[in-house]
Amino acid sequence: MKLHDHFSVLYEAFRSIEVKAGLPALASALDCSERNVAVLLEKMVMAGWIKWAASRGRGHFSTLTFLLTPQQVRLQVLSDMLSAGDFERLVPTLDSIERGALASSLTDLFRRNYIDPDRRRLRVPLFRTVLSLDPAKAFLRVERHLTEQIFSRLTEFDHASNRLMPSLAHHWESNGDCTRWEFWIRPEIYCHDGSELTLDAIKNSILRVRDEPGIARKIFAHLDHVEICGPSQLAFNLTVPDLLWPDRLSSVNASIVPFACGEVFPDMPVGTGPFSVTHRSEERLTLGVFRNYYRERALLDEVDLWLMPPETEINFDLDFGSRAGDSILKQRLSKLFNGCLYLIFNPKQPYFADNRNRFALVELLATELIKPPFDRVCTPARGILPGWRHNEAWPSGALSVEAGLVVRIASTPRPLPTLLAEVARRKLQALGVTVEVATIPDLDKQSPDRAWMDKTDIYICSEVLSENRDFGCYEWLAEDSDFRRWMRPAELQHLDRALMSVQQVPDRDERVRAYAEICKDLVANGSVIPLAHERVQVDAADHVGGISRIAHGFVPFADLWIRQDSVAAAVRSE
């Protein structure tokens, strides 16, 4: 039995803050000798958990004073283990209650002593485990964000200038009808394993996205073949004209994989991005700076992600590493996600084949969004994207319920969709509907077949588009998004024809206007009904610099740096 376990036994046996008890009584409670009790008490005193005043002589009692509760002691023990870097050894030993306590207390634990003056390192908790880091399979926003840190792409979107910019490719051009695109690749680009990136690797990376199962397979389906034209030049030949081809190559799924993928690749991938994976376990993922990055190296040496079980949503922030006595000055970055939380309906459920019932249910839920706790984290959506107005022509009316109706509702495991699913259950049950609610695990959500959708009538899901609003809209509408699975065949054909026209429009602003009209049609026919725009907020302590933008709900790690003067001040304050 560990020392804190002995403390818990004593606390349960003698609950008063101050008790009169001799060694025999304490030994009986702990089921050990008086000599061992004396040793244990001395250790607890040194740890600051108790005060122990031993008395001498018959008729005199020793005094035991509890300075902490068992929960506080456990928190201190966890903190000490975390400080010693024992997170991976610690987590598997915890039961579900202790894991929940660890998650809820993580902020306090991280604030104790986690500034490292000798290394530019950030330790950041992540609210769930990380799935495959194969970019061709990246589906959820955590994996998409991490993939962007580990891999590079031929092109990239610059949020400051709102333009597509060169990345691994320094130049590109097309033929007259945009069915052939030629790209010139930068020389001497090195991978995390020290090998030099080859044109064959670039060619095979893009062909993988087209040929292997994945959410982006459809948007690369018109790639006919790839030619290597010279030592630094390759050409992509398409079956149809496409002015968006350079944008497609900036997507996370089009990240360049520098070698033939093996069994360990999804867990320990090798890329050419600013960070490489240096450690991977169920409890921890460590990204180290890649010093041979073809651009300016990242300003941090290491980002250590501590993966928190169970799947407890902790707002991503960079407040960790500060000390309790530090300046209270904080940085805060807040924005609405470029996307929305929306509802889709299974057309095989006859009750929701009537769009009036779809809209009536959404209206019921929308009335809750202006109340706590929703009003703090989201705002009612009038369209698919913030600023768009698509719901003004919704048919009004009460939800009509038929006898014996059973409705199966599913949501993602994130708190807001889960909470809305419970609200929907309560609203429908009040009308006499039998409701079954399920939370779809992340691993099932990204499965290619998504068999769980066959057993679902309503799905509450959310979409976070990329910073590139132009291609982000196209990508969501064209790829294997959830809503496409439940669209009627005629509506799906109409959508694909509209997208085919959009990819031949040269002006970016005109394309965005076209997406707005496409989404307006989706809302009008009930294929996608927007419910809320989520607000993401990142807090950072004043020792963290580089907080300028949020992508996928996270701050790009390559932008971050440590203010050494703040670190030094924190160290001196001890």
Image (spheres, rainbow, N blue to C red):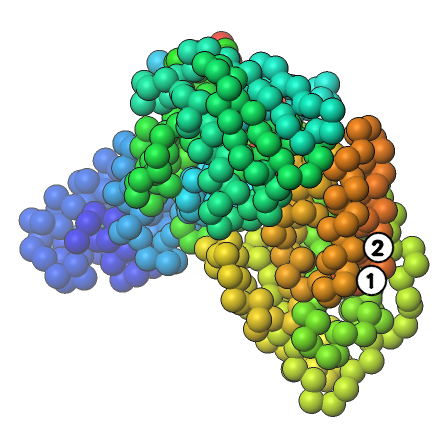
Q: Judging from the image, what secondary structure is the residue with disc 2 in? A: helix
Name the residue rendered at 42%, 28% in the picture: 201
Mark drawn on residue 496: none
Q: Which residue is mark 1?
A: 525
> 70 or 291, which lies in front?
291
Q: Position of residue 404 (x, y in %)?
A: 69, 89
Relative height, residue 485 to residue 543 (above, below): below
Q: Which residue is mark 2?
A: 521
Q: Is residue 432 visible?
A: yes
Name the residue rendered at 41%, 35% in the picture: 305
Marks 2 and 1 sit apart, C-alpha to C-alpha, by: 6 Å
* Mark 1 closeness class: few <14, some 14–19, many ≥20 residues within 10 Å: some
* Quadrant in the picture for residue 531: bottom right
Name the residue rendered at 76%, 74% in the picture: 353
Q: Is residue 123 visible?
A: no
58 sits left or right of 160 in the view:
left
